[in-house]
Amino acid sequence: MFTGLYTAASGILSHQREIDTIGNNLVNAQTPGYRADRVVLSDFEKQLMTRMDGTNTDTLGNGSGSPSVVVDSVVTTTNSGTLDQTGRALDFAIGGDGYFTVQGEDGATYYTRSGNFELDAEGYLSLSGLGRVLGTGGTIKLDSADVTATSDGTLYNAAGKAVGTLRISGVPAGTAIEKLDSGAFLVKGGGAMGNAANYTVYQNTLELSNVDQNQEMSMLIRAQRAYQTCSSALQIADSLDQKAATQIASV
């Protein structure tokens, strides 16, 4: 009976994580440059044995242990979003690989595909809620929003003077990054990314999120049904457990 309880409970926890992840994707469907996440589920026994001693679990049968599931990982989809021409001078998008680099208000360095920039109170190019945009020579201060940009991210003011070049960062092989709920990324351990190699900077353009709302809604309905099924199974298993304990006690 305990096996049934554990199986149903693990299903509830795993599908709740899936529902939360899909919900966050939907919330950020209109966030420029946002990348959707996917929850990957795995068999509990395989995860346990792998983490204990790296045992090859391919030989484990379906009848071995409890069929409980756990969240193996949350992966970020890598396909780009559609480029949308906005006509706004401080809107930028990256074609190809790379991330805009932002110096956070907390001192951390953030990486993002969101390029809906603005000027802060001191005239620095910034991303609302995150911090100041970094160029190859540090933060970028502009006289006004009247700027033009070349494909490598070099910015020119109204007088035609170069005022900075956007720092487009790439992820070196072996670099571990983590994604925040806002869609921005951090390098784990406080490290830094390198320079991106293959990219084009577009001005007056934003990259939309890669969230397919119809697909997300279908996945959400499926995850909710799975959650409800596990919840019902847990209630049934608990009821049977209580009934068995009562009947045994009455004998």
Image: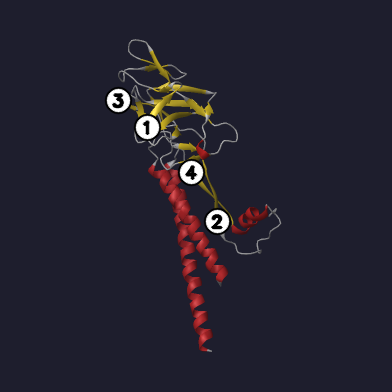
Residue located at (57% from left, 31% from top): 172
Q: CA distance from mark 4 to mark 2?
A: 17 Å
Which label is found at residue 131? 1
Looking at the picture, which amino acid does disc 3 mark? Glu
Quadrant in the picture for residue 112: top left
Dot 2: what SS? strand
Q: Give the residue pinned by disc 4.
A: 37
Q: Contact, CB < 8 Å: mark 3 with mark 2?
A: no
Residue located at (63% from left, 64% from top): 65
Q: Quadrant of the N terminus?
A: bottom right
Q: Is residue 64 above or below residue 149?
A: below
- Residue 85, position in %: x, y? 38, 25
Q: Earlier in the sequence, mark 1 or mark 4?
A: 4
Q: Nearer the viewer, mark 4 or mark 3?
A: 3
Looking at the picture, which amino acid does disc 1 mark? Gly
Q: Give the residue pinned by disc 3.
A: 122
Q: Is residue 145 above or below residue 17?
A: above
Q: CA distance from mark 2 to mark 1?
A: 36 Å
- Residue 39, position in %: x, y? 51, 48
Q: Give the residue pinned by disc 2.
A: 70
Q: Earlier in the sequence, mark 3 or mark 2?
A: 2
Q: Is residue 60 left or right of residue 127?
A: right
Quadrant in the picture for residue 102: top left
